[in-house]
Image (tube, rainbow, N blue to C red):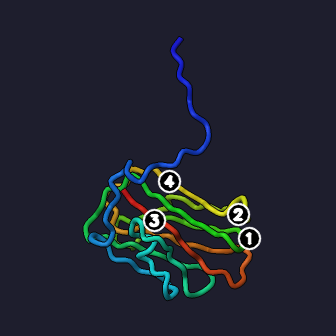
Amino acid sequence: MRKRIITQGIQETSETAFNWLNLEEIAEVEISSEQEGFPIEAALIADSGSCWQAADSGEQTIRLLFDQPQSIRVIRLLFQEQHQERTQEFVLRWSPDQGDNFHDISRQQYNFSSPDSTRQLEIYHVDLDGVTALELCIIPNISGGDTRASLTEWRIA
């Protein structure tokens, strides 16, 4: 009988485990809003020490438009919320045709509740070729109210 022990629990993937794309050099970013002092670059550039935050409440969109079609194997998203209990939803999509048509990768909801649930890390292993755009739509609070979206990290390999 062949057997192997599988590990249980969540294992975070090391930053060095993947060859993350340098988004500054290969993509243009479109955003629906941006809070002064919390630019989108903070979420897209490694070790920025900050995060992106929307200037406006409600649904927000971040769209990466690649200069050349990309092959994407890993997408890493990190959201953090220390202060406000809420249920957030996001949709992650990709496009092969500069955003004319999008295909869902993931649609997810989760709760932020301090102090136990203040961080949401998502790592998607995908097999996408010819990607010309990635789009992340965030509804920061599905119950509404004056809640602003934020994103701590978005990495792509």
Could you tell me how far apart the alpha carbons at marks 4 and 3 are, in whole angstroms? Answer: 10 Å
Question: Which residue is tagged 4?
Answer: 123
Residue type at mark 1 is Glu
Question: Which residue is tagged 2?
Answer: 111
Quadrant in which residue 27 is drawn: bottom left
Quadrant of the drawing holding the C terminus: bottom left
Point out residue 139 in the picture as x, y percentages from the top left corner. 62, 74
- Give the label on residue 154, or none: 3
Say whether disc 3 or disc 1 marks the residue closer to the N-terminus.
Answer: 1
Quadrant in which residue 144 is drawn: bottom right
- Give the label on residue 85, or none: 1
For label 2, the crowd category at 10 Å Cα-Cα, with few meaning under 14, some 14 to 19 and many 20 or more, is: some
Numbered disc 2: secondary structure: strand
Could you tell me how far apart the alpha carbons at marks 2 and 1 are, in whole angstroms? Answer: 7 Å
Q: Residue at x 59, y 77 (%)?
A: 149
User: 114 left or right of 129?
Assistant: right
